[in-house]
Image (cartoon, rainbow, N blue to C red):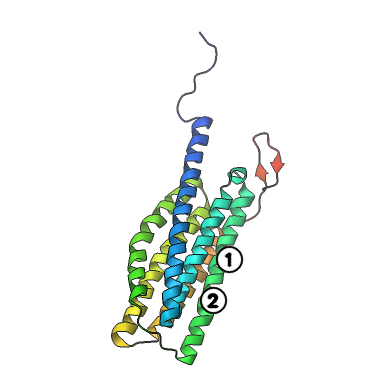
Amino acid sequence: MSGRPVRVGRGPLQGVEERMRLVKRARLLARLGLVWHGIEAGVAIGAGIVAGSIALIGFGADSLIEAAAGIVILWRFASGRISSEGAERRAQRMIGLSYFLLAAYVGIESGRTLLLQEHPATSWVGMGLSVVTLLTMPPLARAKARVGEELGSAAVKGEGTQNMLCAYLSAALLIGLGANALFGWWWADPLAALVIAGVAVREGLESWRGEQCGCYAGEEPDRREDGRTRRAR
């Protein structure tokens, strides 16, 4: 009979396997979001240019930024960075910066539209897109939030929050475009865009600080099992 101890319950091997399963799921969800946001951006920006709608163009810009956030997650969980705390922190901040870029663009363009009183045309394509996004983004956001929580990754949770923000923005967009189409309230469109900008600033601050999962906001070196430190790639 072998004198080796029998491993019972959830040991180190099972823990590593579970983490790898979650990492693969995070990658898959990021890729799914990347494909959708690419399509969404093309439709929204094209329809926004045709209609002269800053809210719709801003929605398309948000889609591009969300696609960039998906690329950040794929970078974060590349094979050489899976356990890197430094990479996690950089990913959090890159996603936070993406929110600030969105807020700056939409805020400036919305203010310009209000000052010049530019009247956007009706965009039924934009309203249809907002309905589809409103239905599809919440499930994707919740899935990413669960994976981020289990991984202890504020970057993944931040990307999931960005997807939920996309759903909220689609609701604001639908209200703005609908009010313009039904009642001729041209100012509803840039006001809806300003809502987008305000929420993006809040979420950007939370992502920058790592507040989505209470992760440590400072820089720490990665630690190997032998207690030595190494620099994140």
Image spot of residue 81 (x, y percent): 61, 46
Please state if 174 lies on the left or on the right of 4 as rendered: left
Q: Which residue is mark 1?
A: 97
Residue 195 seen from this side: no
Image spot of residue 177 (x, y percent): 35, 79
Against 202, residue 155 (above or below) is above
Find numbered disc 2 in the image and state the secondary structure of the residue it sits on: helix
Q: Residue furthest bottom?
A: 116
User: Of 53 and 9, which appears nearest the observer?
Assistant: 53
Number of marks in the rendered image = 2
Image spot of residue 94 (x, y percent): 59, 61
Against 203, residue 194 (above or below) is below
Residue type (three-letter) at the residue carrying disc 1: Leu
What mark, if any, has residue 52 been given in the picture?
none
What residue sits 36% from the left and 56% below the top?
139
Q: Residues within 10 Å of mark 2 (few under 14, many from 20)?
A: some
The nearer-to-camera label among 2 and 1 is: 2
What mark, if any, has residue 105 been given in the picture?
2
Q: Residues within 10 Å of mark 1 (few under 14, many from 20)?
A: some
Image spot of residue 215 (x, y percent): 55, 53
What residue sits 50% from the left and 66% below the top?
64
Q: Residue furthest left?
A: 182
Give the distance between the C-alpha atoms of the residues marked 2 and 1, in whole angstroms: 12 Å
What residue sits 53% from the left and 81% below the top?
108
Quarter residue 125 falls in: bottom left
What residue sits 47% from the left and 30% below the top?
10
Against 96, residue 156 (above or below) is above
Residue type (three-letter) at the residue carrying disc 2: Tyr
Find numbered disc 1 in the image and state the secondary structure of the residue it sits on: helix
Question: Mark 1 or mark 2, which is nearer the start of the sequence?
Answer: 1
User: Of 100 and 66, which appears nearest the observer?
Assistant: 66
